[in-house]
Structure formats: structure tokens, C-alpha cells
Amino acid sequence: MSQRSMARRARRNSLSTRSAVRGGIAALTTAGLILLGLPTMAAAEEGIADPAATVAASPPAEPAPPPEEAPAEALPAEPAAEEAPPAPEPPEEAPAAEPEAPPVEHVPADAGTDAAAAEAEASVAPPAADAAQAAPLAGPPSTVPEWNDHVDICHATASDANPYVAISPSVRSIIDPNGDPSDPYSGGHAHALHQDLRDVIPAFDYLDAEGVQKHFPGLNLALLPILGEDCEAPAPTLQLGFVPCIAPNGELPALDVTLAGLLLAFQYEVRVYAGDTMTLVGSHTFTATGTGFQWQFDLPAPGAYLVVLHRVGDDPENDRTGTIVILPCPTPHWLLDKSSDPADGAEVSPGELITYTLHAVNDSDTVVTGAQAYDDLADVLDDATLVELGPGLTGPAGTVLTWNVPELDPGEEATTWYTVRVDADAGGTLLHNEVEPSPGGECPTEPAALVDEDPCVVDHPVMLVDVGLEKTATTADGGPVDSGEGDVITYSLTITNVGDDPAYRALVTDTLPEGVEYVEGSAVISPDPDAWGEVTVADGVLTVQHEGWLDPGDVVTITFDVTVGDLAQPAPDQPIPPLVNAACVAVEAYPPDDAPALAAVADDEPVGLDTNPANDCDEAETPVKSVGLVGMAQCVNDTPWFTFSITPFEVGDPAANPIVLIWWTPEAFAARDPSIPASDVAAILADGASQVDPIAYPAGWTSGMTISGQRLWPGAAVNEAGDPIAWPGWTQLADGTWVLDPSAPFYDLRDEAVVEIRVNPSNDAVAVYPPPTPNCNAAPDQPVRPVTPAAASPSRGGLAATGVDGTAVLASAALLLLLGAAGLRAGRRFREAR
């Protein structure tokens, strides 16, 4: 390294190393410096943590002799991000005449702050050749510094209390991104990039490693005149701008705070306190992006205020403060109050008129001009209608009326008014009305001036007659009912006066659903059944009326039973809709002699009617069990099949509700006992059924899901290849010929059969045996059996599947052999398992 060309003016205090490796390099570098008789500095490690800033005494004109053998006392090391054993401390050159300066306390800085981003981008540029030389902090060097010569800079620390320290790194350690390995100030990085570009570096010319003269434009040059040669941060300046007096009817002006002499990238806080109570009324925290800053604070009221400027992390003793006093200017004053007819708090009725009156009086010694009152009708116009406005009133704008108060001399008064009509459906509401004066006016607060408890607020509760009805329906087992089985439904009606006022002669009407019949004498009224008239049923409507008054909070329960008859099914494959029962309650108007005294009620407007129709009616539904069935007889590959789609509705647990397909002759079906549950197959056969085929529920089945499948006609059979080998009513003789045989199995199903689906409830379809066609004949050939093409046929014992059966047999049947010969007969039996 070449001999330095200009005197080092930075403080010379050794710094702790950041890692064992860096410590070793620093020790070797320091030893080399001692041999040259130069002051020593420990290397800084940017990648671990910034060292504590220190301030050393200024060196004498001539270098002092080498130190004694004992090394000088070193400063405590800054803790590293990862602990490492400390490197040996290099000896410190003893300064002449001046004692060693104490270390400055280190306060860690916030990592990742926007430190001088905008200014750094503007002031940092790549080195350029042939540029004019500028003076560093210590003044212009006698010669252009070379690559390894040193330049005085202000080094940014991580300490908020002492943000900069003066050092003299080499040109290389300032310019080279990798720093200067031989420079204790370098730390493996360029100072131009240090601490998020926060170092303060003067512009200077230099000779690079190749001896070419270039120019460094400097970094954060705006801070040079602020920091000075010693790199110490001076106190910023605080200037306050305010208006000392509030103009009449004017707004309190904002406080302007202007700051100067700020440190870039440092955080500051401005606080404003009320001077009499020291209550914080405003604060603003910011990071300086320039040396100056301006902010405004809205003050709550006139008075004295203390403004404090604090640099975050700095000693509060260094805070800058300022005080202001803002006094109210002389201003007019007036009082506002409000009244109404009917008076505040009086109950009003739907249709009633209310007149509000606004009153203003000048209680000051000056003229009141430009005064206004703002009457908010948001909680009035939602339940009333504006009828008429008095003088000086405009609006409403939205829901606010504005009164332009006329000019008032001291002691003078003014009055205006407006009228509203209460809506017919406003029962039970509260008409709340509040007026506010413009600045300079107020509602009276002195007891002598009070008209009532709150002279600017008027409330009117509206009469509420509200009788509600709720209805429920229950069955014996809590589940759906069957059609035609005499199931009983119990209806319960609850009538409640939920209003604030009595209700007169409540009338209950209940429309019964089709297919049910009222059980005579089953109605029960509780409590006080004698207060009600007779329960009557006419044209399917049950009616009963109260003969007197239902007071607020009264609850009456009415229960009665109906039996379920035969219910119509819209179509064989559709469910029976639920039984819907609706009931309503209504009240009569108060009789004239019993109506409460209400003022200004509109003519022909009845009093006491129900004001809330939303809860007057209710309904209850009772689900009905049913089975949807679509069945069809088909000839497929000369074999008779019955194809079906079954949809059980309102059927619960499949295990408790088995499905069977029952084959009947028409005569046996007509004489059958439908009360036999589907689970008792033996009893069904004993009842005359020809055959019973169980149908399994598919996995994951739920009520309303369709189950599709097909079954061979009783007496029919196929071999493993799907070819027919038997037909109902046919017998094969010894010579191989087939003949119709009345004694053969299922001969009586040969022409026609009734197929019943029983799930408790049940449904049925009449199926005609598939007639022969040129393409399919569900009977043996006579006398010689023709060759039958091999075709897949549904398995006789196959389980039903949900949805459409997509086998090849059904596809062939649909395309080639569909005859559509199935007849459907609407017939259902709906019941529960006994």
C-alpha cells in the first residue's frame, strides 16, 4: 500500500471484529499499520452488525511515537448476528496531548427502512473519467488521491443517538463493491453502498487501480453542511405557523409545523399537547427523506398548545419544543330549542298530525347573522310523511331540514314550524327528532333556559297493536302420513299480543288442506276458553273469534285434529305434495267509547287495528309418503321382461322400509289385503300373490332417489347365454315340442298381470304380456325352433340399480324390440307398516 498523501483527520479508536475470520484479517492489517507508525482501526463487518460509533481525539501535527508494549484499552465489541470468538485487539496509537474520547452508546437501527432512497438514487452514480475534482470533508487534498489513499467521510452507524462518525476509509473501500481487504474501514463492501446508502461522502476525483483519474459524485451531499467536518448531527429547527384568533363563525385554523435540518432516513415524531392538561391531541411519525418537512395538525379548540419534535432513539433532552396560544375572537351567540304538539313524550296514533316548532334567541351582545339550524328527520320520515313547512325552512336534503335563521339583534327571537302525519303502518315505532344549531349557536344548558330535559330533542312513541299467529303440525310418530289410512294430524295455533296496546276481538281463521277432515269436538282453547265463541267449520275453513280484549303479552293456544283421507297423486311417477295448512288472525278497530284519547287523528281513520301484518298468518306442512312407479312389459330376445323405475318419496331408513315387486292376477289383486307389510313375503304369497321379488336399495340411496331395474316374467327363464328356455304357461313335451298347459306354472299370468310395488305405501301398474312381433315372440317356436342370435340378457337375479340400466340388452330392446305394450293403471295404496 502506498504512503498516504493527506493527513488522516478522523478519530482513531479501535473497533471490535465481527467474526473469527474477519478478526484475523483485522489483526494482520493492524500489525502492518503499526509497523508504518500509523493509527489503527479495527475492521467493520457489514454483514454481521455495525460497530458502535466512537469519537477519537484529533491527532497532532506529527505522528506520536509507537505505543508502549501494553495495548491500549479497547471499546466493547458490538454483538454479532452469530456469535464468534473475538479477534485479538490491535494496539492503539497513543494520541498526543488530548485524552482518549469515550465511546458513544450504540442503539440498533431498524433494518429495512427506506433510508434516503430517493436522495441516494439522485446522488449516487457510477465513477466517470475526466470529471472535475471536488473537495472532501477535510478540504481538498494536496494531490488527487490514489486507489489506496484515504478520504474523510461521515460513516452511518446503527445508533439513533449518534448516527454518524467521522472516519477515513480508502478510495478503494468507497468505490469497490467488495471493499478494500487491507482497509480496516472496509468490512468487505463499498462504503458507497453501506447502511442502505446512508454514508455521507463528499465528491472527489481519484486515481483508480490502473492509475486512471475518475470522479466520484458523492453521496447524501445535502447533509454535508448539516453534519460539518466532525460529523455530529446538529439539532433541527422547529417553526410553528398559526392564527392566534378564531374569526366570528369561523373554523379553528390548522397548526402548520415546519422542520429543517433533519437527518435523512431517520425517524422523527411530532407531538402536540394541550397546554393546560398536557393531553396529547395529535401526533405524526415520519422518516426523513429530505432535510426539511412540513405537516398540519387540526386543533380541537382554542387554547395553549405545546409542540415537541423528537428524533426516535435520541435523548429526549435533545427534543425541540415550541408553544402557541389561540384565543377565540369575539363571536355572536344564540340559543336553539324545539317543542311539539302533541308534547314531547306523548303517544301518538297512526294517521295523527304532529307539529314541530323551532325557536331561536340571540343571547349575545352582537348581531347574529347567517345562523342555521339542521333538523334531522331520519327517524321521523321512515314512519311519517312531511305535510307542511314553515318560513325559512328548506329541504329536506336527504332527511335534513335546514332553517335559515333570520338576522337577530341582541335579545331578539325567531320561530318556525313544520307538520308531519304518522304513517298507517308505523305502530310500535318511535318518532325521534333532533335539531342541531350551526357554529355560534347551542341548545340551552342553563337550568333557567331549559324547556325540558333536552330542548333540542322530541320523541313520540306510536301506538302499537300487534297480534301474531304461529302454527305447527304434528303426527303420531312425528313423521309423514299415508294417504287413505286415516292418519291423524294435530294442528296447534299460538296467538300472542306482541304489541304495546290491547287488541279487540281477535278473529282466527284456518283453511284446511284438501283431503283432510276436521275431527268434530277436538278443538281445545287455553286459557280462558269462555272468552272465545264457538269453533265452526264451513267449506273447509275453521273459524273462532275472541269476544273481548287481548292485553299486551297475552298468549292463547288453540289445538284441533284432522284425519287424512285419500290424497290425489299428480302422476304415477310423481310424489303426493305435502299437506299445507294456513291460518291467520285479525283484530277489529276499537269501539268509539273505548278508544284512547288521541289528538289530531285524521277523520275516518280507525284506531286499534293491527299495525304489523307481517306476523298475522302462518302455515304448517305435513309430508306425505308416496311411491312413484313407471313400469313396462317388454319382449327381449323372445323373453318377457318387466322394466320398472321406482321412486319412494318421504321414506326414511331403507332397512325399515323394504321394497318388493308383487305379481298378481287381476282377480287376486282386487281381493288382496294391502295392510300386509312388504317385509312379510310369506303372508303376501298366502294372500294370493303369484310371485314376490325383493328389490334392494342401492348403496347411498336417499328418499326421492329413483331405483331402476327389470325382472323376468314369472315362469320365464334363460340359459347362461341369455337365450330363453322357459315361458309362463308353456310345457315342453318329450319330443321337444312346446304346448300351452293350464297346469303349467304362472299360466294365469300368461295374458295379463298386475305388478305392485309395495314399500308401505304402495303403487301398482297393470302389465299386459308382451304380444308377438316379427322381431320378438315371448313364446316357444312351433314346430321347429329357429336359430336365435346370441345376445346378452339381463340376469334374472340381478339387483336393481339407480338411474338408467345401460346394459347391451336394454339398448337392444330399446332399439329393436320395444313394443310399448305396457298399460298403466292409476292405483295406489299408501300405508305404514303394521
Image: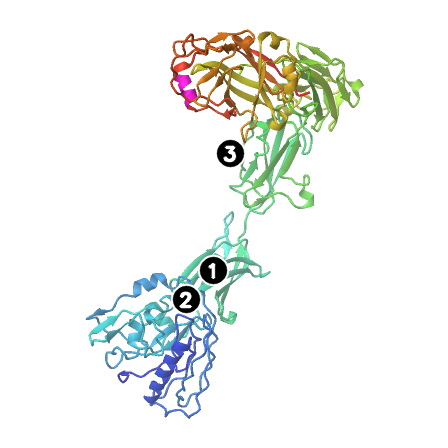
Quarter of the picture containing the C terminus is top right
Crowd band around label 1 with a 10 angstrom C-alpha radius: few (<14), some (14–19), many (20+):
some
> Residues in magenta?
808-815
| Label ID, residue 285 | 1
Residue at (45%, 17%) from the top-left corner? Answer: 724
Left or right: 791 as drawn, with respect to 327 = left
Give x and y (percent) for residue 619: 63, 22
Question: Mark 1: which secondary structure?
Answer: strand
| Label ID, residue 398 | 3
Question: Mark 3: which secondary structure?
Answer: loop
The answer to whether the residue labelled 1 contacts the one labelled 3, judged by CB atoms less than 8 Å apart, is no
Q: Nearer the viewer, mark 2 or mark 1?
A: 1
Q: Earlier in the sequence, mark 1 or mark 3?
A: 1
Which residue is tagged 2?
262
Gap in Å between the C-alphas at discs 2 and 3? 49 Å
Crowd band around label 2 with a 10 angstrom C-alpha radius: few (<14), some (14–19), many (20+):
many
Left or right: 502 as drawn, with respect to 248 = right
